[in-house]
Amino acid sequence: MIPAPKQDKTLIYVSRGTCKKIIKNKPNFYPYISSLSQYSSPFNFTIKLYIYGENFLPNGLTKVDFGNIPNIEFKYINSNTLYFELQNFTFPGLYNIVVKNTINISAKNPTANTFNGMILKSNPMQYTIVH
């Protein structure tokens, strides 16, 4: 029969001052437009307008307003790039482009904040159409 090993009865004390604090960065859901670029088709029948920036969300959580036209149809490329097409019949003028994210966060803790349907808007970027 093999004897059981002796157990060490020393206590290890860790002071609270030596514990490392973990800082978690909260995600940023505010969209930001940094620049625009356009690509025209031959004879300017359509114009593809690319929006470059940050924090664009997939799956219908991001919407784009073009001037006074809300929620225009666009293509999501990645979290930094969107694009949409303008037809030749769009009136000349100055248009503000705004990207909006709809945030639906349900907290697991009942005392925590829940953000359902919260809309976060980007900075407006101006685009001029000249015919």
Image (spheres, rainbow, N blue to C red):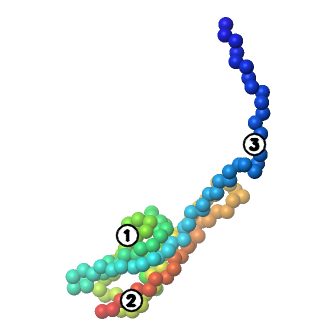
Kind of residue indicated by mark 1 = Lys
Badge 1 local density, few (<14 within 10 Å), some, or many (20+)? few
Dividing the picture into quarters, in which one does residue 116 lie?
bottom right
Vertical placement of residue 42 versus 21, above or below: below
Residue placed under numbered mark 1 in the picture: 75
Which residue is painted at 25% across and 85% down in the image? 44
Residue drawn at 36 percent across, 92 percent down: 92
Quadrant in the picture for residue 4: top right
Alpha-carbon distance for marks 1 and 3?
54 Å
**Residue wearing tag 3:** 14
Is the C-beta separation of discs 2 and 3 under 8 Å? no
**Eyeballing the image, is 6 above or below 91?**
above
58 lies left or right of 105: left
Q: CA distance from mark 2 to mark 1?
A: 21 Å
Residue displayed at 42% across by 78% down: 35
Q: Residues within 10 Å of mark 3 (few under 14, many from 20)?
A: few
Q: Which residue is mark 2?
A: 128
Locate residue 94, reporting x and y percent. 42, 90
Q: Nearer the viewer, mark 2 or mark 1?
A: 2
Mark closer to the chain start, 1 or 3: 3
Q: If the image is split into quadrants, where does the C terminus sit?
A: bottom left
Q: Is residue 77 visible?
A: yes
Q: Residue furthest left?
A: 42
Q: In the rendered structure, which disc, 2 or 3, sits on the residue that comes first in sequence?
A: 3
Q: Nearer the viewer, residue 25 or 122?
A: 25
Would residue 67 be seen by someone viewing this image from the given angle?
no
Q: Which mark is residue 35?
A: none
